Image: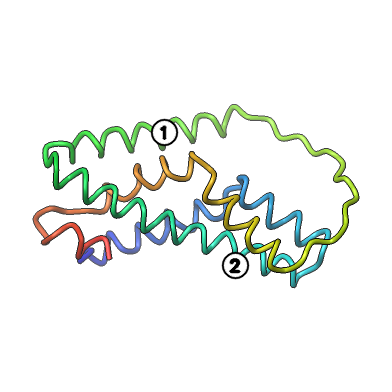
Amino acid sequence: MLQTADLWLFFAMVLGVILLPGLDMAYVMANSLVGGWRRGLVATAGVVAGGACHVVLAMLGVMTLLRVVPAAFNAMLVAGAAYIVWIGWSLLRSRATVGELPTVEAPSLLTIFCRGMFTCLLNPKAYLFMLAVFPQFLRPELGTLGSQAL
């Protein structure tokens, strides 16, 4: 199990990730602005469903890799930290631009949900981020990696 300090650190990191604008946040905001709170909520539910899939896939990927190559744990920690630093540096150097949204026919709530889920699932950076984050909170001395990941 995670130590209490690690759990609070994990929640703080997740909150920071949620607050940072990205593709998923842009999708939710666009649906909220164009279609109101109900469509924004459905878009959020779709993104959360996609995020849950990311968590499960990352957990299984990390567990499988560490079971096959246990020595890869420290390399994953270093690579994950380097990737997070690169993301931060890229955000500091980026410039945001806002354009006009085209007028389109309102999609169904199911379509909005599915698009939100696939927007999250098809984002390759999200997979890299999950693989960078999960190993930071795993401690081999606290038991099996599967029980810690759950």
Q: Residue furthest top?
A: 93
**Amino acid bearing label 2:** Ala
Q: The C terminus is located in which quarter?
A: bottom left
Q: Which residue is drawn at 48% across and 57% down?
A: 51
Q: Is residue 84 above or below residue 106?
A: above
Q: Give the secondary structure at mark 1.
A: helix
Residue 45 - label: 2
Q: The N terminus is located in which quarter?
A: bottom left
Residue at image mark 1: 85
Closer to the camera in the image, 82 or 45: 45
Q: Residue at x 50, y 30 (%)?
A: 89
Q: Residue at x 35, y 57 (%)?
A: 9
Q: Which residue lies furthest to the bottom in this view?
A: 38
Q: Which residue is drawn at 20% across and 60% down?
A: 146
Residue 16, how many percent across, how many down? 50, 53
The reply, left or right, for residue 52 in relation to residue 134 is: right
Closer to the camera in the image, 19 or 50: 50
Residue 63, how many percent across, how many down? 22, 51
